[in-house]
Image (spheres, rainbow, N blue to C red):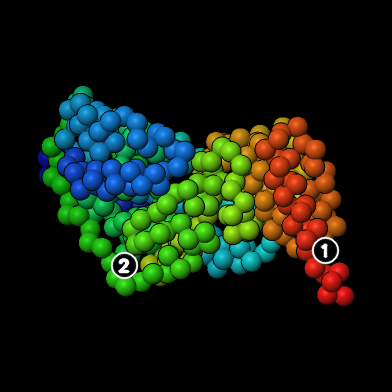
Amino acid sequence: MAALKAEVIDWCIELGFQQAGVSDVDLAEAEGRLAAWLRKKFHGTMDYMQRHGGKRSRPEQLVPGTVRVISVRMDYLPEAQDTSRQLLDDDTRAYISRYALGRDYHKVLRGRLQTLARRIEERIGPFGHRVFVDSAPVLEKALAEKAGIGWIGKHTNLINRDNGSWFFLGELYTDLPLPVDRREDTHCGTCAACLEVCPTRAIVAPYLLDARRCISYLTIELKDAIPVEFRKAIGNRVYGCDDCQLFCPWNKFARPSGEADFSPRHGLDAAELAELFAWNEETWLQKTEGSAIRRIGFERWLRNLAVALGNAKSTPEVVAALRARQHDNSELVAEHVSWALEQHDVAAKMESNDV
């Protein structure tokens, strides 16, 4: 098993993963944290977080026979972090979480993990396994932490001390009793940068995230209207939020990924808000083909853009873009456009009073 594990780690690197590790399936500690988090209702409308009984924290229940989990990470940062930080200050352009700029990561990692499984099978014959990439009740961060990939930081993302946190995770559940790796220790210390920089104060305490306040939740998971109390804080973030990573000191070690699949597509890394808002659904489908952005649908895409345009500086172009959808067929979109136009009316009145 030790020799096989060494080969597996080598194959993972050959397949484009930057790191791999092995853990057992004892997640009792993480199960307790999850239960407490759910009791606080911090999962919001993400009902799937409490489904499936104990399968999320008990891998052997999800895939009977599982005794080990091979966790892998793949770096995805598409550009220098300074470029991303500067974009947050440009209210005419859309900020899209950097993980979603390229090809859908689910497809990239899943395909390579399936190739890994085939290689193992070619070496030892049939074995029990199943591949997961953020696609089932799996506590991927807790498993990766036990596998030595990194530690769960105060912002609840996984951090690697040599490479930061800009990476995806994937898992191969298996019945092979491979040697396990040593769990990574926590290295956040007294740092509170992520808590302080979060625009909506979603990190309510170290290692505790209230998803209902998180911009990633509000722009991706939430299907209804975005609560008014959070709209100004969203700024120009139209799909997800990276602030807690962009300002994490450990990410000084992060480097842009050389993975072609994660390179930005269709200029979405710095697109004009007004231009994106003018797209019809056909154009949106074309420009987001093969992208994780597809999961929110066109209606929520417009909802998010309307909020960002409401936060932009009042210009004839911005106001015209909003008025063009003032009577949108979608009540959800129309309501957010109305709010956005109201922001510009207020700004105009204030400017008039100053004069």
Q: Nearer the viewer, residue 164 or 205?
A: 205
Please state, as top left, top right, bottom left or bottom right, where the N terminus lies in the image: top left
Mark 2 residue type: Cys
In the rendered image, the vertical position of residue 128 relative to residue 243, given as above or below: above
- Position in image of residue 180 (x %, y %): 15, 47
Which disc, if any, is residue 348?
A: 1
Per the image, label 1 sits on a secondary structure element best described as helix
Left or right, 335 with reference to 257: right
Q: Amino acid at mark 1?
A: Ala
Counting residues from the start of the chain, the first of labels 1 and 2 encountered is 2
Q: How many marks?
A: 2
Q: CA distance from mark 1 to mark 2?
A: 45 Å
**What is the number of the mark on residue 188?**
2
Look at the image and tell me whether residue 195 can be seen.
Answer: yes
Report the quarter where the C terminus lies: bottom right
Q: In the image shown, does 160 or 43 lie closer to the viewer?
A: 43
Around disc 1, counting alpha carbons within 10 Å, would you say few (fewer than 14), some (14 to 19), or many (20 or more)?
few
Residue that appears at 72% across and 50% down: 339
Residue at 61% over, 35% down: 297
Residue displayed at 39% across by 69% down: 192
Image spot of residue 62 (x, y percent) = 26, 29
Q: Position of residue 86 (x, y in %)?
A: 61, 67
How packed mark 2 is, by other alpha carbons closer than 10 Å (few <14, some 14-19, many 20 or more), is some
Task: Answer yes or no: is residue 127 visible.
Answer: no
Q: Position of residue 251 (x, y in %)?
A: 42, 65
Q: Is residue 354 left or right of residue 119?
A: right
Q: Tell me, yes or no, whether the two marked residues, 1 and 2, touch with CB atoms within 8 Å.
A: no
- Say left or right for 306 vs 242: right
Quarter occupied by residue 59: top left
Q: Is residue 296 above or below residue 240?
A: above
Mark 2 falls on what kind of element?
Answer: loop
